[in-house]
Amino acid sequence: MGILEKRGPARGAAIAAAGAAAGCEAMTRAVLIVLWLMTAGAGSGVAQQVSPGAAAPAAAAPKSWNELSPAQQQLLQTYRGQWSSLPPERQQALANGSNRWLAMTPQQRASAQQRFSEWRAMPPEQRQELRERWQRFKSLPPEQQDRVREQYRQFRQMPAERRLELRKMWRQMTPEQRRRFIERRGQAPHRGR
């Protein structure tokens, strides 16, 4: 049972959810940033890992500059002079990212730009930590990822004061207290609301 599973109104469950959600909030923001970076090609240092047993992805074929749409060429104009020397995987990532960008609404673009600005303002250590959190999240089984997303959504629907209170309680716990609490929660029977 994951640390974010719904457990009824028990205070301890709310604390665990708050702590996990506090970390999850940063993780979710990081997930969005990293996804955008990976798809837009801005995160060349962010490598995707292939899970064991998964088939290796097919090598990307080189893409000529003229194969890009005029809108893509305009968006990627800073790469024009070096396009043919970019690795095919990078060309593909940039082409895919530009397609996604062009499909976004102005509001989605503004939000993505804000997240990217936040990402670039982070110290390298924080970016690395967020990359690692993303990889840990992606290594979870799909059902657990869905559970984390759903419980994060539920946490976000709580009143702001309650979220702050729960985060404060979680942050005041020592790492050992958090670990024991999560272990106990995983062993307790499920109580519905």
Image (tube, grey):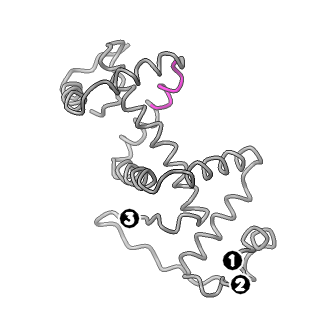
Magenta-colored segment: predominant secondary structure = helix
Q: Quadrant of the N terminus?
A: top left
In the rendered image of this protein, does residue 171 appear above or below residue 144? above
Quarter-of-image position of residue 10: top left
Left or right of 104: which side holds 169? left
Residue type, mark 3 in image: Gln
Q: Compared with residue 160, is residue 118 higher up or lower down, i.e. above or below?
A: below
Front disc: 2 or 3: 2
Q: Amino acid at mark 2?
A: Gly
Which badge, 2 or 3, comes first in the chain's sequence?
3
Say which mark, if any, is on residue 81: 2
Vertical relation: 16 (above or below) 135: above
Q: Label 1: which residue?
A: 79
The x and y percentages for residue 126 are 43, 50
Q: Point out the tag, 1 or 3, that comes first from the N-terminus.
A: 3
Label 1: element kind: helix
Asked whether, in this view, residue 26 is left or right of residue 115, the answer is left
* Quarter of the figure with the C terminus: top left
- Disc 1 from disc 3: Cα separation: 26 Å
- Above or below, 21 relative to 13: below
Q: Residue at x 71, y 50 (%)?
A: 109
Amino acid marked by disc 1: Tyr
Give the magenta-colored segment's residue range.
Answer: 152-158
Q: CA distance from mark 2 to mark 3?
A: 30 Å
Labels 1 and 2 touching (C-beta < 8 A): yes
- Crowd band around label 3 with a 10 angstrom C-alpha radius: few (<14), some (14–19), many (20+): few
Of residues 154 and 166, which is closer to you in this image?
A: 166
